[in-house]
Image: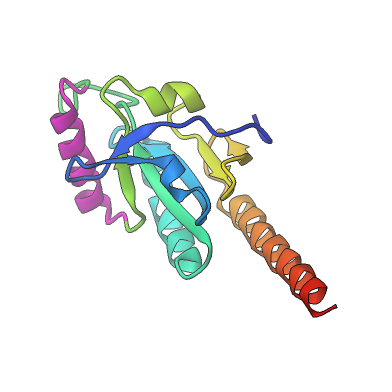
Amino acid sequence: HVGAAAPVVTLYQLDGTPVRLSDFRGKKHVAFGFGCLTAPIFINDVPEFNRLHRKFSETDVSIVTIYVREAHAAEHYPPHASLEQKLDRARELRRLEALEAPLFVDSLEGDAHRLYGIRPNMVWGVNRDGLIFYKATSLIAGELELVLDSVLEADRLVQLVADAGERM
C-alpha cells in the first residue's frame, strides 16, 4: 500500500547478476513497471516508459522495468522453464521493442510479482527512503509524470528549507 515500506526483492540484470530494488535506497526514487513479451498493454506502453526514462534520467528518479511471467503464454512464448529462459525473453523484449529503460528480471518463481501484486502491468513508485509513494494497475504516463515531478519539487523545497536553516 502507498505509505508502506517497499518489499525487498532480488531481481536479475540481463547478464544474470542479482540486484535488489533496495540498492536504490538512499540514492534515488524509483518508478517501475511490470511487463513481458506477451502483455500487449505493456508493449503498447514501452514508448511512454522510454520517454519517461529519458526525461528523468538526469534527475533523482530512476525509471525501470521488471520482466515478469508471461501474461499470455502460448506456443511461441510458453511459461518460463528456467531463469536463463526468462533472461533470454527479457533480452528479446529489449531488442524487439527498443526498450531504453533499465530492465531487470524477476525470479523464476515471481517473487517480486507476488509481493507487489500479480497484475501483469502494475506500476509502482518507491522513494529513496524505501517507502511506496505510487501504485497503479497500469501505466498512466501523464499521471506518473506529474507525481514524479511533484516528488522532485518536494525534494527541492526540502533542500531550500535545509539550506535556509544552515544560513541562520
> Which residue occupies 69% across, 68% down?
156
Locate residue 12: give its quadrant.
Answer: top left
- Check residue 87 for magenta coloring: yes
Whether residue 118 is visible here, answered yes or no, is no
> Which residue occupies 57% across, 46% down?
140
- Check residue 45 for magenta coloring: no
Q: Position of residue 134 (x, y in %)?
A: 62, 42
Q: What colour scheme has been applied to the protein in the rendered image?
A: rainbow
Above or below — where is 126 with respect to 154?
above
Q: Is residue 19 left or right of residue 50?
A: left
Above or below — where is 149 with respect to 74?
below
> Which residue occupies 79% across, 69% down?
161
Locate residue 165: give its quadrant.
Answer: bottom right
Whether residue 15 is visible here, answered yes or no, is yes
Q: Position of residue 91 (x, y in %)?
A: 19, 45
Q: Of helix, strand and loop, which mostly describes the magenta segment? A: helix
Q: Position of residue 135 (x, y in %)?
A: 60, 37
Front-most of 154 and 35?
A: 154
> Which residue occupies 44% across, 60% down?
53
Q: Is residue 68 left or right of residue 116?
A: left
Residue furthest to the right in view is 168
Boundaries of the magenta span: 80-99
Q: Is residue 10 left or right of residue 5?
A: left
Q: Position of residue 82 (x, y in %)?
A: 15, 24
